[in-house]
Image: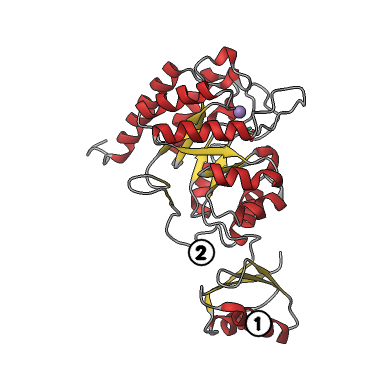
Amino acid sequence: MQDSIIVILKPDAGPRGIDEVRAAAKREGLDVKVFGAAGAAKIVILGGSGGLRDTLASLPSAERVLLTSRPYALVTREYRDRPTVADFGPGLAIGRGFTVIAGPCAVESRGMIDEIAAFLASLGIRFIRGGAFKARTSPYDFQGLGEKGLEYIRLAADRHGLKVVTEVLGAEEVRAVTDMADILQVGARNAQNFRLLALLGAAAKPVLLKRGFTSTIDELLQAAEYVMLNGGDVVILCERGIRTFETATRNTLDIAAVPVLKELSHQPVFVDPSHAAGRREWVPSLACAALAAGADGVMVEIHPEPERALSDGPQSLDFRAFEVLLARLRAIDAAMASPTPRGS
Ligand code: PEP
Ligand code: MN
């Protein structure tokens, strides 16, 4: 790919700042693409050289100027060398320590999601997941409760002091989900829905972006770049298994994606062991592997009665199994945090 230049304008740059960049690019015969409004604009120039970069960097309205040969820049450590943290107020963050998000595949009723929220809160978990809009392979399967589901998960979370992670399926729901959720999930089937990713960038809430089943790591990072280019700041990169020749598991968990993504990107990296495994018996092993591999957290499906779940029952842990897993994760986390004993 050809080099491109990304100019991040200062918050007070205003429309004049954009015009200055445009004029400098035009002198070299290059076009610019402006993302975001003046004040938070990011300008991309396709083509360009070190000379133009230096000229742009000397403009008073330019905050940062990056020259890159990769198809993504904002998600890289070159753009931000400290890890990105999603901050949710005192003592609550993603990207600082290991975080567990848990909840049902789908919100099935008001009572069910409240029961799960109470259970999670009792264990000190602070993030609940649950789909209100479900992307089901078969149109005959349960499609979620829609806006009612959003309302139920918000109510339950508020009652028990939790944050909500829920999926946005289409552009039509961006508004409703943004109003109700704390983290906007993009599912594997939408991993390259670039219009949706751009809209979510403008929504100003953290995005949890699943890797598509056939997306390379490079493609996942480019999808995250769409969110950042359009104004998003936190994009939690979530490995959830990819499609390979192996059929024993529902998907193949690419555990190596964790260290690779951590090296390339400043964004938090999560693993969803549930959709990777497809069977609850294998979920704990994959979750522990994720922690050991350096992930910032896992997102796990649980259900009070998995055999009655309306979606993804076979891969959902019951409460008891989740408690056992959580104890294991906490023990591994503590062991990893303690310094290696001498002589070992
Ligand atoms: C989900 O989290 O319930 C889900 C549908 O996941 P994915 O998009 O990874 O299949
Ligand atoms: Mn699911």
Query: Looking at the picture, does residue 282 appear above or below residue 99?
Result: above
Seen as rendered, the residue at the extreme top is 307
Q: Which amino acid does label 2 sit on?
A: Glu
Q: In this view, does 307 lie to the left or right of 324?
A: right
> In which quarter of the view is residue 67 placed?
bottom right
Q: Residue at x 50, y 38 (%)?
A: 164
> In which quarter of the view is residue 168 placed?
top right
Q: In which quarter of the image is ligand 1?
A: top right
Would you name the residue on which mark 1 appears?
Answer: 19
- Residue 215: x %, y % from top left: 68, 43
Distance in Å between CA atoms under marks 1 and 2? 26 Å
* Quadrant assignment for the C terminus: top left
* Quadrant assignment for the N terminus: bottom right
- Residue 172: x %, y % from top left: 71, 45
- Residue 18: x %, y % from top left: 63, 78
> In which quarter of the view is residue 99 placed?
top left
